[in-house]
Amino acid sequence: MERRFEVRKQEILKEAKIKPAVSNEMLERLEQFTDPFIQCLKRPEPKEYAQIYIVGLLSDLKRKNVESIAYRYNLERQNLQRFVGWAPWDHSSLLEELAKQVGANIGEDDAVIVFDPSGFKKCGHDSVGVQRQWLGRLGKIDNGQVGIYMSYASRIEHALVDVRLYLPEDWAKDKARRKKCCVPKTVRFETRQDLALEMLQTNGQYLPHQWIAGDDEMGRSSHFRRRLDDWGEWYLLDIPSNTNIRDMALPAPPYAGHGRPGKQPFQRVDAWRDSQPADAWTCIDVRDGDKGPLKLEIATIRVVARTERGRGDAGEELLIVTRCLDENANLKYDYHLSNASSETPLTTFVRVVKAEHRVEDSLKRSKSEAGLADYEVRTWSGWYHHQTLSLIASWFLIQEMRRGKKIYSSYHGSTGPDIVSDVVASSLRSEVSRLAETFCATKKRSKRVGSFSLLQTT
């Protein structure tokens, strides 16, 4: 079954030719799409460069950095580099516009906001925030930068919406490096969880949602969980397998006759998992996948989790353990804590868990399709400028793929949705690149404005 699926997928990808209806008026849609974003920029020069850079990020270039984009479209590299790396334009207004569009287009009242750190391996020590630190995507400590991403997942689609650069504490205190990388004086050290809370407070209001989710780097912090609870947010956050919990369903040990009444001892969540009988697990069909039904088993219990300071005063939470078979047919376990009611349907927890995993697809899509990790900048503003424009480019691709799926489904009604996505994405890359040359040609200028030499193509 799996081999036939892969063979059929490769056949479709090889033979795929973009339908005229998919690319029809794409150039006009691209200009209309970029307009509300560039209107956030006050001066005309950044508006020109922002359009060109987004087009370059949407192209089929192998490396989507300043040099490659400038060379591809015969632009002055230094001017484009100045726009991305040093030009004083505010990226936050563009991210606000992005959040508004995502919420308006794919928003649902019970959707999920997901926070996830993503590491970028980098050489040297001169770029902003670069040092040896934990890079979650690589699964090890290495030299690099870490971005904290806010993703939005509904039943309709999922997209990256906001981002913050994590500045390690040693880095934040180093005045020489801060000055070299133009880190604003107002920037201070903030934990990864604090950066997530900042994004939620800034742009979460534009994203209708019912749940907050995140990986175990987010969930391990009891302070983060308490802040979300104080704000009235329902959370379902991953936690490490060595998290200590007290099972509130177990009776207290007999009173010893002196001192305080005894309590059940803390135990690791993986130890609690191993102690559960077979009937503690409930099997749920997640959805029908291209390789057959996807099933997940879930078990829950009310617990008190031990805080980072070793105390068990974090308050009662719901421990949720899920397990499924991995690619090698071995059981894979995930552990979560939630402040939701014990009466919440298990199917709801499973939906949130699956939504949380979709942030990995969002990051992968942005890196492979919109150059999220291809930047070669060293400054604070340069990092944010590239990241912001990459998230915007990804959002355009998402809207085009949604449109393309509807068209392709009418041609290939029996084709699986994942195959359709691959076909549309592959076709759009080449089509956008072709249209990009036309787009750049329409922006041809021969005069200088301000301190920028406007874009020239031949």
Image: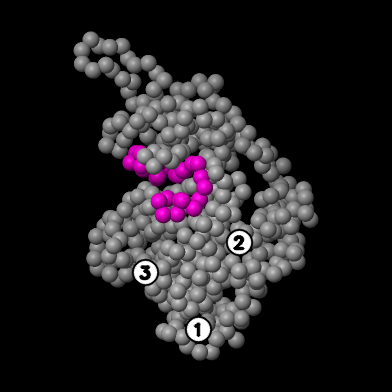
Which residue of the protein is positioned furthest toward the top in this rendering? 257
Q: Residue 215 location in percent, x, y?
A: 44, 44
Q: Which SS class for mark 2?
A: helix
- The residue that appears at 58% across and 81% down in the rendered structure is 443
Q: Amino acid at mark 1?
A: Leu
Mark 3 lies on residue? 379
Compared with 66, 221 (above or below) is: above
- In space, the residues marked 2 and 1 are separated at their CA atoms by 27 Å
Residue 149 position by quadrant: bottom left
- In space, the residues marked 1 and 3 are separated at their CA atoms by 23 Å
Q: 341 or 177, which is in the foreground?
A: 341
Q: Which SS class for mark 1?
A: loop
Q: Residue 276 location in percent, x, y?
A: 48, 22
Compared with 39, 152 (above or below) is: above
Q: 453 or 65, which is in the foreground?
A: 453
Compared with 441, 295 (above or below) is: above
Give the position of the N terminus as an image quadrant. Answer: top right
- The residue that appears at 74% across and 57% down in the rendered structure is 407
Mark 1 lies on residue? 454
Which comes sooner in the sequence, label 2 or label 1? 2
Asked whether, in this view, residue 243 is left or right of residue 186, the answer is: right
- The residue that appears at 50% across and 61% down in the rendered structure is 97
Q: Amino acid at mark 2?
A: Leu
Give the position of the C terminus as an image quadrant. Answer: bottom right
Q: Residue 102 location in percent, x, y?
A: 55, 55
- The residue that appears at 23% across and 10% down in the rendered structure is 257
State the predominant SS element of the stretch in magenta: helix
Mark 2 lies on residue? 397
State the extent of the magenta-drawn residues as a range.
Answer: 200-228
- In space, the residues marked 2 and 3 are separated at their CA atoms by 27 Å
